[in-house]
Amino acid sequence: MPAWRTISLWMDQLDEPLLARPALEHDLDVDVAIIGAGYTGLWTAYYLKCLAPALNIAIIEAQTAGFGASGRNGGWLMGNLLGEDRLLADLPPEQRRASYELLHSIPDEVEIVLEREGIDCDYRKGGALYCAARYPEQETSLRHYLDKLYSQGLTESHYRWLSPEQLAQQIRIAKPYGGIYAPHVATLQPAKLVRGLARTVERMGVRIYENSPVTHWQSGSLRTANAAVRSRWIVPAVEGYATTLPPLGRYQLPVQSLIVATEPLSAATWDEIGLSHGQAFGESSRQVTYGQRTADNRLVFGARGGYQFAGKLRHDFDLTTSEVELRRYLFGELFPQLKHVRLTHGWGGNLGMSRRFKPHMLCDHASGIAISGGYGGGGVGASKLGGRTLADLILQRDTELIRQPWVIPQGGLDALKTWEPEPCRWLGYNAIIRSFVHEDQTLANPATAPWRRKLASGVAGFMEGFMQ
């Protein structure tokens, strides 16, 4: 049996034995065939069964529930979508506010399901702290972002500026310049959530087959090594593994994010740091950092990891020394007392990125294909919204969910924007990342001349806009 327990800290912490469910060894005829037992596939099955209990649903999983990003992420459950400001900018004010409220309600809706289904995943809704730290330009960029949010009709009840003193009441970081507090974020133990959802849908009558990679799929059918499945609906719910199911890799590419976890820290150390109410946190450089305090008092801290030429999946997540030390450096700059703390776990995962850098949800009744993905690192919450939306689309329910701007109401996969061919993607990615790293190194040095700081930020900002 594969060493699934070594996938991440989260999988290692599970009390349950990681025994494989039976593989698919016989042909099936079902109403809905879902490829992938991660969050998207499980939430889709859950809401379909809630709304139409008689549906015959099978989930076909290449490894085990939680093998992908659902068992590897940083444990942020956000009431947000990647690129939501761009998605909602052109809506009438009332509709925009309603869409934001829909997104912000995601953590509370998840909590309701957890209580109803008896899923314990260390859920704590403490909000998120987006910190301006290390250099003053982070404060400038955060204030600009906050002004943009307020211009779209949001208020202090949604996002609130914290002075350095107010920030220190929740988290005590080195070189604070302030921050934004967002209440609509929770932290949780990702593997407990995905495994709990899998057990829940099984109780509802969904069959899950593991160790059954899909070798071919098309409208109305799919194949594994040992079986054929016929289905009215095919739901490829593979996110970062889209390249394994051609032609999905044209629309959604794998990007890696890497995470480390400390040993459990003492109560005295946490008194120095804060984070006593389940808050998520990150600083505001363009390198994308994120962290949380776990239920057993570890610090989990991650940052974006990379992109491989031709969109190749990364399978080996035994982190290199340089990968570990970059993350140690980043959290050590925020918490100097942790620079030499022992790290017990290091891991990573493949997440899915769409070309428009925003999620998509579509359902083509002609082909019987429904898909939700492109979450870009925000999949813990976005997948819940995606699963609920796909259920409404498949069942042709007229709800507010199907009228949102991230939903593509007509057309199949061709309605999605394709990625550029290689080597354009690889060259573009590396140029962008190098500009981000150069900006961060330039701004973190207080001796850097003002004109160099402005130039570095200007180039990085241009590259970020070019990327989108």
Image (cartoon, helix red, strand yellow):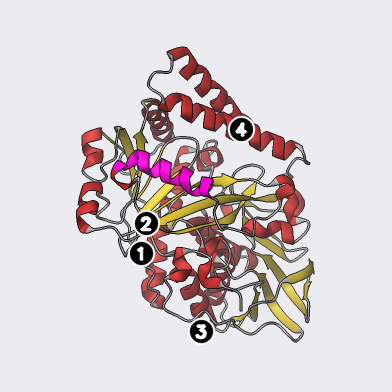
Q: Which amino acid does label 1 sit on?
A: Tyr
Label 4: state its secondary structure.
Answer: helix
Lateral position of residue 404 relative to residue 449, left or right: right
Give the magenta part as a residue range. 321-336
- How far separated are the C-alphas under marks 2 and 4? 30 Å
Measured in 3D between alpha carbons, the distance from the residue under mark 3 to the one under mark 4, in whole angstroms, is: 46 Å
Residue contact at pointers 1 and 2, CB within 8 angstroms: yes
**Residue 386 place in picture, x, y as percent:** 56, 59
Residue 439 placement, left or right of 243: left
User: What's the residue at 32%, 52% (across, down)?
Assistant: 279
Query: Do the numbered discs 3 and 4 sit on residues whose CB atoms are within 8 Å?
Result: no
> Mark 4 sits on what residue?
432
Vertical comparison of 253 with 209: above or below: above
Q: What residue type is labelled 3?
A: Arg
Look at the numbered disc 2 and give the secondary structure of its residue. Answer: strand
Quickly name the residue at label 3: 203
Out of 300 and 361, give the one closest to the viewer: 300
- Front label number (3 vs 1): 1
Q: What is the x, y in percent for residue 203?
A: 51, 84
Residue where numbered disc 2 is placed: 186
* Mark 3 or 4: the one toward you: 4
* Magenta segment, prevailing SS (helix, strand or loop): helix
Q: Between tags 3 and 2, which lies in front?
A: 2
- Position of the C terminus, as image quadrant, is top right
Few, some or many residues within 10 Å of mark 4 (<14, 14–19, 20+): many
Which of marks 1 and 3 precedes in the sequence? 1
